[in-house]
Image (cartoon, rainbow, N blue to C red):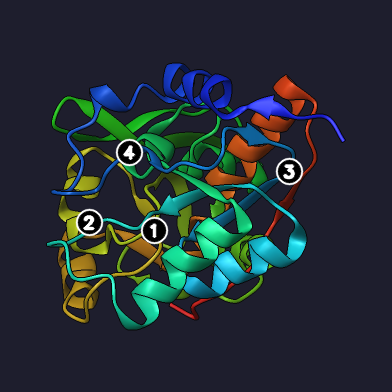
Amino acid sequence: MASVSLDRIVRHCDLLLQPERFADYERAWNGLQVANRGTVRRIAACVDATLATVEMAAAAGADLMVVHHGLFWAQTTPWTGRRYELIRRLVEADIAIYSQHLPLDGHPRLGNAARLAAALQLGRCKPFFSRKGVTLGVQATLQRPLRREALAARLAVVLGAAPTVLPGGGPDCRRIGICTGGAGAELEQAAAEGVDTFITGEGPHWTFALAEEAGINVFYGGHYATETFGVKALAENIAKRFRLPWLFLDRPTGL
């Protein structure tokens, strides 16, 4: 089986995604989080780096995991119990972890929002949802508006489950903004950027009233479900560039 230097893959991904441009959440380390012995033969894409997905990657014979939610989010805690088991399995199976959070949300071609828009067949998109000098989503303006029910049906097919709909706007969806994950609490910003429909993963209870006040339709498709697209696109890009096999490890959270 062919193998490629881990360093070559990391350099390729860092140049492609430019993580230095993004002011990500505190301690959300973008880039190589765990090294292996230096070579890659098979890539596994998954949304979350957890003990369960590491076990899945090891069973699949992968030696590189491409993830959206990596290992480092909060203050470092002792590597004991299940945290120890996670690092033990990574070392035993010689698996590296490469993680990109906001850079993989905002990429104009491989990003979660861009790939979800393509799957929904929304046509040409422009950047949307600015945060600290970069954009994290995309916006499409439709020549022929979609009925709210029709867009919900498309989302159900693409995401594998019916979205939660906050019908705060009109029955037609023409200017559709997408920012995946947990951007529901920021729907005021979406409305301020001129969209009449906002697609994201999840949001708080109080956003139902906020959607009505802002006059905007909101679709919550699930945090996990809306963020499967970027890791798939990145893994496929790496696989084509370096002629390596890849697979997607599906571990839905239900959220």
Q: Is residue 108 left or right of residue 213?
A: right
Q: Foreground mark, 2 or 3?
A: 3
Q: Earlier in the sequence, mark 2 or mark 1?
A: 2
Residue kind at label 2, given as amino acid type: Leu
The residue lying toward the viewer, choosing from 193 and 26, is 26
Q: Is residue 169 left or right of residue 74?
A: right
Residue 137: give x, y in percent of width and height.
37, 39
Q: Which residue is mark 4?
A: 30
Q: Which of the 4 image quarters holds residue 93?
A: bottom right
Q: Foreground mark, 1 or 4?
A: 4
In the rendered image, is residue 144 in sight? no
Label 1: few (<14), some (14–19) or many (≥20) C-alpha neighbours in 10 Å: many
- Which residue lies at the image location 37% right of the left edge and 73% below the top edge? 84
The residue lying toward the viewer, choosing from 159 and 95, is 95
The residue lying toward the viewer, choosing from 173 and 38, is 38
Q: Earlier in the sequence, mark 3 or mark 1?
A: 3
Q: Which residue is mark 1?
A: 200
- Give residue 42's mark: 3
- Which residue lies at the image location 49% right of the left edge and 37% below the top edge? 111
Q: Give SS at disc 4.
A: loop
Q: Give SS at disc 1.
A: strand
- The image shows residue 4, relative to residue 114, as above or below, that is above
Residue 96: give x, y in percent of width and height.
52, 46
Q: Earlier in the sequence, mark 4 or mark 2?
A: 4
Q: Earlier in the sequence, mark 3 or mark 4?
A: 4
Q: Which residue is mark 2?
A: 187
